[in-house]
Image (cartoon, rainbow, N blue to C red):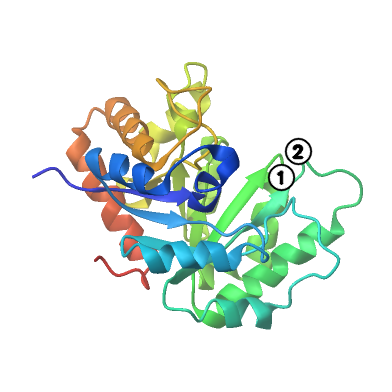
Amino acid sequence: MQAELVDSHCHLDLLESPAAGEDLEGVMAVARANGVGYMLCIGVTLARFLHVRAIAERYPNVFASVGLHPNEKTDVEPEPTALERLARHPRVVAIGETGLDYYRSEGGLDWQRERFRRHIAAAKACGLPLVIHSRSAAADTLRILEEEGAAAAGGVMHCFSEDWATAEAAMGLGFYISLSGIVTFPRAHTLQEVARRLPLDRLLVETDAPWLAPVPHRGKPNQPAYVRHVAERVAALRGLPLDEVARATTDNFFRLFSRAVPA
């Protein structure tokens, strides 16, 4: 029997929006048909957290996270205790996504670094792993993770797009590496080398849906079913059968997100 896949990072609340033109029931059915058994729906704003949580309550194979994306501007920064309170819900299995993004944010970014530290503090306090977003900010991301003792919480570097040295440093801090549809892009040679070298017990796969659709759907809205293409590409790069990659990444997901219980 083919092992089930897990989409370890998607935004089902955005797929459900009228603007996306998607029917969430249909999205879930297509995912099941492609062997995707579980999904982690990621929180990026506190205003939409109740929507994210409601999806996880509606579907037993969907889990949720709570956090404030590094690019989201807000007048009031969340206190770690506020994040901890929201994370007490049994369907919430992670803190994030959080981290640093120097690509889309400009000017003084001390507020972004402080927000990141608050999320790390919340994760350590409530014993949940972190979901890390890092873009054009690898050195500072790793530095803050180390300074704040984030290894005590652990977590995943989501949508990883850096080189092997960065992957090695992150794993040295106890983090997993999650590969998205980028690994299927023809020119993603550096990332494909990372995919070949990663220890199988530190690997996750994701879609980041509705963004970053993999080949052969590149340029179209992404959805959890397409995590199969990510896993297939990783399997091909490593010379492994798809079932072995599916089984390993699913086992890794439930090991990392220990509050998540298979339905």
The answer to whether residue 97 is visible is yes
Q: Are marks 2 and 1 in contact (CB under 8 Å)?
A: yes
Label 2 or label 1, whichever comes before in sequence order: 2
Q: Nearer the viewer, mark 2 or mark 1?
A: 2
Q: Residues within 10 Å of mark 1 (few under 14, many from 20)?
A: some
Badge 2 marks a residue whose secondary structure is loop
For marks 2 and 1, give the CA distance. 8 Å
User: Which residue type carries mark 1?
Assistant: Ala
Q: Residue at x 34, y 32 (%)?
A: 234
Determine whether 96 is above or below 122 in the image.
above
Type of amino acid at the residue the image marks with label 2: Tyr
The disc at residue 57 is: none
- Looking at the rendering, which quadrant does residue 75 occupy? bottom right
Between 61 and 19, the one nearer to me in the picture: 19
Residue 193's image quarter? top left
Residue at image location 56% in from the left, 43% down from the top = 18
Read off the residue under disc 1: 137
Q: Is residue 80 left or right of residue 180?
A: right
